[in-house]
Image: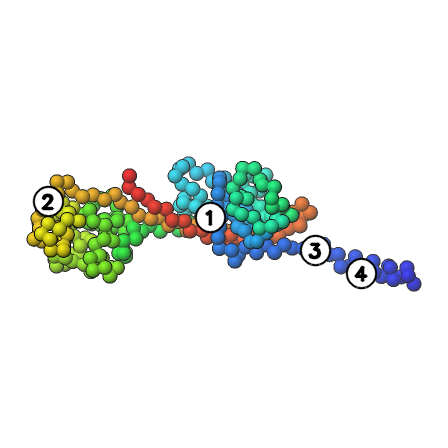
Amino acid sequence: MNRLLILFLLLISLSCDDGNFDLPEFNFTAIDDIGYCGEIVLYKINENEVLIIELDSNLDDTEDTFLTHDWGDEQTFTVSESGTNKITYRTLSEQPSSDYFCQNIPPVSPKVTNEWTGTGVVVVSTEVIEDDNDGVEELDKELNTDGDAYPNYIDSDDDGDGILTSSEDIDGDGDPTNDDTNGDGIPNYLDDDDDGDGVPTKYESSTEDANANDSPDYLDSDTTTRLSEARTIKNSYQKTYKTTIIIEGLQLKNSDGNTINYDVYEFGTKEVVKTISEE
């Protein structure tokens, strides 16, 4: 009887062993932040889990980083078992800090409790948005009022009069397009002679009030005091890079041969703002 019971229990245990394993949580979709460091190391942290992408981008422009480079609609990086591009998923003994990913020598703590190496194709795309943030919505990307090297949408001084477009909002309502000091139908931000006195704005002081009437010279038609040199402003605008990363055909495998598979895995989108200043 005892032998039959032991045999019965053994058969039950064998029938339940179908090769399954404890699948780790692997949940990074709710994690918005993408970390970045070193020679193209991208990572996400979810408590004690980390997902790491290491890419060889071959960027020639030293001023560009992976996240401030325009990759266009699609740039692919193949990740194989023997290649330089890598995808690694780890579970750790505790949640790591960002320093964990950015050291040349891997830290001893926190300890790796399980590691999975991946293959697949990393697909990168970039949306680049350029704006001078001057309070004017520029729909015509070709318009260049002052004829300099910068069209109005990335020109911090649209009319080249030495006054920032954002500072030509005289009434302070946040809209420079409705301020017209001399009433000539041309708003100040597009008018190179704001007060209509015949002296270009860039040759009139923006701080002095020659006749003490609480109006700076460049906005006072009764003052024609001329500066010896034209006032100039170095241009500055912002480029926003929205980099989206997905992994096609992702397969992660650990040392026991267990796998985690995704046809398409959305790693996420990282937004980086870069200021472009005229030298």
User: Mark 3 = which residue?
Assistant: 20
Mark 4 vs mark 2: in front: 2
> Three-letter amino acid code at disc 3?
Asn
At numbered mark 1, what does the secondary structure look like: helix, strand or loop? strand
Distance of label 4 from label 2 (alpha carbons): 99 Å
139 or 237: nearer the viewer: 237
Residue corresponding to mark 2: 226
Along the polypeptide, which appears first: circle 1 or circle 4?
A: 4
Disc assigned to residue 124: 1
Q: Element at badge 2? A: loop
Residue behind mark 4:
12
Residue 244 got which mark? none
Residue 2 in the image: x percent, y percent? Answer: 91, 61
Instruction: Tell whether label 2 touches label 1 (CB within 8 Å).
Output: no
Which amino acid is tagged 2?
Answer: Arg
Q: Quadrant of the C terminus?
A: top left
First-in-chain label (1 vs 2) = 1
Mark 4 Cα within 10 Å, few/some/many (few <14, many 20+)? few
